[in-house]
Image (cartoon, rainbow, N blue to C red):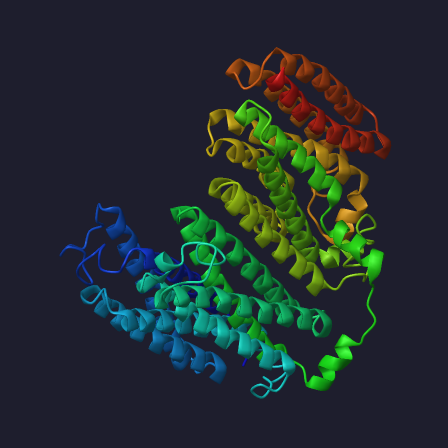
Amino acid sequence: MNIENKTLRYWLLTAAILTFVSLMIGYAMRFNPVGQGCPDFPTCYGQLNFPQEAAARVEMAHRLVAALSGLITLGLTIWVWVRQQGGWLKMSLTIASFFFLAQLLLGAGLVGQADSVWMGVGHLAAALLTMAMLSTALVVSFVSSPDARRPAPFLHSHLQQHSFIVLLVVFALMISGVLVARLDAGSACSGFPLCEGGLPVSGLGWLALGHRLFTLLAAALAGALFLFTRRAYADQPLVLSSASALIVLFGGQALIGALKVQGDFPLDLVVVHAAITAAIWVALIVLFSASVWRGRSPAEERQSASMPRVRGVQRLKAYLMLNKPIIVALLLVTTYAGMVVGGKAIPPFWLTFWTLLGGALAAGGSSALNQYIDRQIDGAMQRTAKRPIPAGILTPAEGLAYGIAACLAAFFLLAGFVNLLAALLAVAGMIYYVLIYSIWLKHLTVQNIVIGGGAGAIPPLVGWAAATGSLNIPSLFLFALVFMWTPPHFWALALVRAKDYARAGVPMLPVVRGEKETRIQIFIYTLELVGLTLLMPLFKVAGSIFLISALVLGLWLIYTAWDVLRKPGNKVAWRMYRYSSMYLAFIFLALVVDVLI
């Protein structure tokens, strides 16, 4: 089957995302029985307009998202039948449409029979299978082509067998979770991991404890599957990244689940736990689909597992370099400064620890994903040719898998031990850097660094949100400071590496508009940056110590930028690049000292 139509893929992705959101909301609604929000269907209290009550709003949102995803799914099914698309895509979408209609009927029946346990189980099962078929169709749309290998026979490879077993176990686990919720079995086993420190004393308590033990079994099987893919599929990005995401998602589910129980089921952790549960299912479906289309014979798996690979210290160093540790360290300085300035004091040790660890994983994971995306142009540039992926120390699949795993772990740590706002801001930074900058802006416009600077400006907001639980106008000054610092810093590097960027086809300012214009823009942005820092005390963001520091540091940076403007050559540009890095660290250190003294 030849699928060249990107529009089809976008619609498949849209349907899958909407179904995921619907599944997540529905899973979270287990804690508010269906029908209590809206007592009728498809209207709510006999009206089509959006209700005022919170529970009714959530239920109507669930219905609307599910309806939209279902309509797209039905439309795509009709489209592939009319256009006579290939059998696998046609079959996946047809089955997805069938389960969507079953989900619709069961959901409508639940409104009148909110206490029906088995109808609730059937409703979730239909939703899970709809998501499974849509995910399968999406994978098929990307991997299927005239020159692609034919799908392997069912359960032909060890990967297929292992992933199918885990798929069945997780499906049963999710269904049992619905039983625990609808029968309120959790109230009979309120502690964690045991029931109030011991064994349960009732059947419902054993059901709840059994669900937790079943979760451990599923996690152990997922861990074994991950280890197997690391050995036999280290060169397959889709297989290894989905397996890596799966094992981190299981860890995140255990962490958030434990914190949720200990915290008496706070709403934010309930929603996060529901999202993780849905994501585990999606990761498993993608992995199993990949095993069908990218799976190997047992002999090929053994051969791949026996291939020599870099190990030991050199491998650990390669993973460290994937994180771009110097950049991560600089971003953590801004994160900690955001915590101190926002909280007006030195933050508690454990809050600092989890915030910085989560921030380091978010920045490092994003850097790894950036190196996976840029692996081809990195190999063409002298500055980046020795990075782990182009140098062949790590496979592209290993870089992608590590980046996804680190980003997921960052979100779970921040959501579980800091707060949801800090976690969502970190996610925004990761999306900004990976999708908006690395995939889109970097190769699209000469303003890539200017617009993309927002990604590096988010860490101080993460620190501020970690310390205060909110954002305000003063916090945006920290964002603006890093945002204005980014262009002169990276344009200085671009002057030094202009030939590299030209060879790689990246439209950096020196390549597109020339060296003279770049030097002028560096000087202008430096003046604007220093001007911003001098305005901050006027808006009560900082005091006199910061004002003096900003003046001294600003004059130093302006003098360096002036050298770049009036002196030719790369030496002054390289000095600007190094000095601007030190400037950012010192200016945020000045903010911290100003608050504490």
Residue lying at 73% horizontally and 58% vertically, measured from the top left: 375
- Residue 531: image quadrant is top right
**Residue 4, can we see it?**
no
| Residue closest to the eye, 214 or 476 | 214
Q: Quadrant of the N terminus?
A: bottom right
Rendered view: 221 above or below 47: below
Rendered view: 527 above or below 89: above
Q: Is residue 511 left or right of residue 412?
A: right
Residue 51: image x %, image y %? 21, 49
Residue lying at 59% horizontally and 59% vertically, measured from the top left: 248
Q: Quadrant of the C terminus?
A: top right
Residue lying at 41% horizontally and 76% vertically, measured from the top left: 93
**Residue 500, can we see it?**
yes
Residue 218: image x %, image y %? 54, 69
Residue 127: image x %, image y %? 37, 69
Q: Residue furthest left?
A: 46
